[in-house]
Image (spheres, helix red, strand yellow):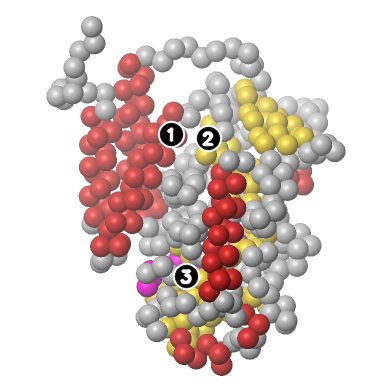
Amino acid sequence: MATDATDRSDAATRPFADAVVEAEQIIRNAPFVRTDQDLAEGLDYLAGSIKASLHMVGAYQHDHPYFASSTGPYTKLGLDNPDTLYFHAYLRDDAEYVVTGRRGSTADLSFQIMNGDYSPTQSPDSLTAFDDRKLDIAADGSFRLRFGPPKDGEGDDYVALAPGSAMLIVREVFSDWENDRPGEIRIHRADTLGTSPEPITSAQMARRYAVAGKMLVSRIKTFLAFPEWHYLKLPVNTLTEPRSTPGGLSTQFSSVGHYDLADDEVMVITAPAADPAVAPYMGFQLGSLWYISLDYINHQTSLTRDQARVDPDGKIRYVVSERDPGLANWIERTGHSRGYLQFRWQRLTRDLTPADGPTAEIVKFDELPQALPHYEDQRVTPAEWKERIAARQVAVARRMLG
């Protein structure tokens, strides 16, 4: 008969329970927590991190790997891109793995090999990064890749794993939320397909809980420290020139910044609408001080080039504001007077220059008609705005079931 371990100090879940308490204290003591909204969002972030940590430790399967969802609307981390489906699988650098799938109609599909995970003191190295242009895609969209130790005489579908390779990350990026459709992707280890893993023991489950607890605390600490490296040392209410994204995404450039706005202030960000032949994907978003995306399902806190209304001069003018200006490119702050700004351009065919990037100015809310050269072209009615939000809700629901 099973014993009742509920009150025992050696309960298998005890290390994880202690980690949850520790993580909550980190959240409550974060230096930017000022309001109940700050704390509530932090506790919600904690809930998502708890789910993600248990999910990820269960996916730590080198011998019978599978793709797990790395982050999503309810398990956010690392300023997640609202336009991206993220997947990861764990690897060993001395084994061979086969990835098969079908290319969807999304703007970008990329692959990245990392030598570990993020920590509060450093980022993992990107060992290999490429997009779907490397794939030999059949007429029906199917493709096949192999990852394994370096070998002589292998074909173009073989990707050599560098020493220390530990994780394969796949990103599928949507630009036209309404019409882009996701593809399919699978992974198996070449020498274990058709075999079954050994049954898990209670001791192994106890170790999983312990590892998940360490992962949870590290995750919270890491992504509270991360913005200090890349964002907060920049002048407030500015954006950097486009630059190759730190972390090794070889065909992605980004522009970043952080903002601090009063409720009667508006940040107007102007950027050229990227030529699809140069950058099939261009996206902009806000992030909270928890370094995660804002609610992008029920609010317009992000826009891709396809979603944005382009002015007659070929530029996109984003209006970051708390108050509703009645404009198509309004980026909702949703009560966040401070936060992060992020542009991404992906699947590039050339390096970007400062002329490809954004500029920003702060104006008073009542000055918008004078500050925007094509103000009337940007006007939307309340009914049109409601349609925009409904389209976002439907698109994300469809994507998550794709």
Q: Residue at x 59, y 59 (%)?
A: 391
Q: Judging from the image, what secondary structure is the residue with disc 3 in?
A: strand
**Amino acid on which the number 2 mark rests in the picture:** Ala
Residue 9 as seen in the image, left or right of residue 16: left
Q: Real-space Cα distance between discs 2 and 1?
A: 8 Å
Q: How would you classify the magenta stretch by its main secondary structure?
A: strand
Q: Which residue is mark 1?
A: 55
Question: Which marked residue is nearer to the observer: mark 3 or mark 2?
Answer: 3
Residue 332 is tagged as 3
The C terminus - image quarter: top right
Callout 1 secondary element: helix
What amino acid type is highlighted by mark number 3?
Glu
* Marks 2 and 1 close (CB-CB < 8 Å): yes
The residue at 73%/81% (across/down) is 312
Task: Answer above or below: position of 236 versus 46.
Answer: below
Q: Which residue is under mark 2? A: 68
Q: Is residue 195 above or below residue 83?
A: above
First in residue order: circle 3 vs circle 2: 2
Q: Marks 1 and 3, how far apart in space?
A: 31 Å
The percent position of residue 365, horizontal first and vertical second, equals 46, 86
